[in-house]
């Protein structure tokens, strides 16, 4: 029977798991605290965050990599940001410098703050 690379990796992994279970091998452990789901954003909060950056809806949309109509819909209360968009807004709120650096990295999008 021919040994494949995948088969060899599986055998190696099983041997490591067995050694760990028997106490003869220690594994590196990393503990990571998973954050709670990103909070819901009210339309006023989104508009306020955009104003903190001192930019128009289209420029804010570019920073978030969404369409201007998406930002407009959020600010009018027609739609709410999805889970990933809520987290991105949270990052923009907590670490606005990241978005300022993004704007400087892409010279086509400029704004003043």
Image: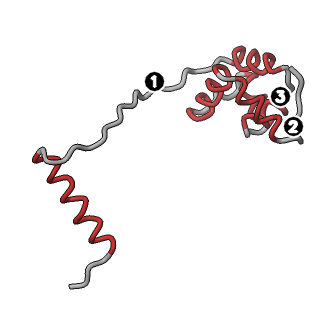
Furthest-left residue in this view:
22
How far apart marks 1 and 3 lie (CA) works out to: 28 Å
Tell which circle, 2 or 1, labels the residue nearer the N-terminal end: 1
Provide residue 73's location: percent of width, then percent of height: 74, 29
Residue picked out by circle 3: 57
Residue 19 higher or lower than 47, as above or below: below
x, y percent for residue 25: 19, 47
- Whole-angstrom CA distance, mark 2 to mark 1, is 32 Å
In the figure, 42 relative to 111: above or below?
Answer: above
What residue is pinned by disc 2? 109
* Residue nearest the viewer, comparing 90 with 105: 105
Residues at circles 1 and 3 in contact by the CB criterion of under 8 Å: no
Q: Which residue is mark 1?
A: 36
Task: Estimate the spatial distance between the alpha carbons at disc 2 and disc 3, rounded to whole Å.
Answer: 12 Å
Q: In the image, what residue occupies the spot 77% across and 39% down?
A: 67
The first of marks 2 and 3 along the sequence is 3
């Amino acid at each position: 029977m021919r040994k494949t690379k995948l088969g060899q990796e599986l055998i190696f992994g099983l041997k490591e798991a067995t050694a760990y279970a028997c106490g003869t091998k220690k594994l590196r452990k990393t503990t990571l605290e998973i954050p709670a789901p990103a909070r819901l954003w009210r339309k006023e909060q989104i508009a306020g965050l955009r104003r903190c950056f001192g930019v128009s809806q289209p420029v804010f949309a570019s920073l978030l990599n969404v369409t201007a109509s998406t930002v407009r819909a959020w600010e009018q209360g027609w739609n709410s940001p999805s889970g990933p968009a809520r987290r991105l807004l949270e990052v923009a709120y907590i670490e606005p410098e990241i978005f300022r650096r993004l704007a400087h990295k892409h010279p086509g999008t400029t704004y003043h703050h």
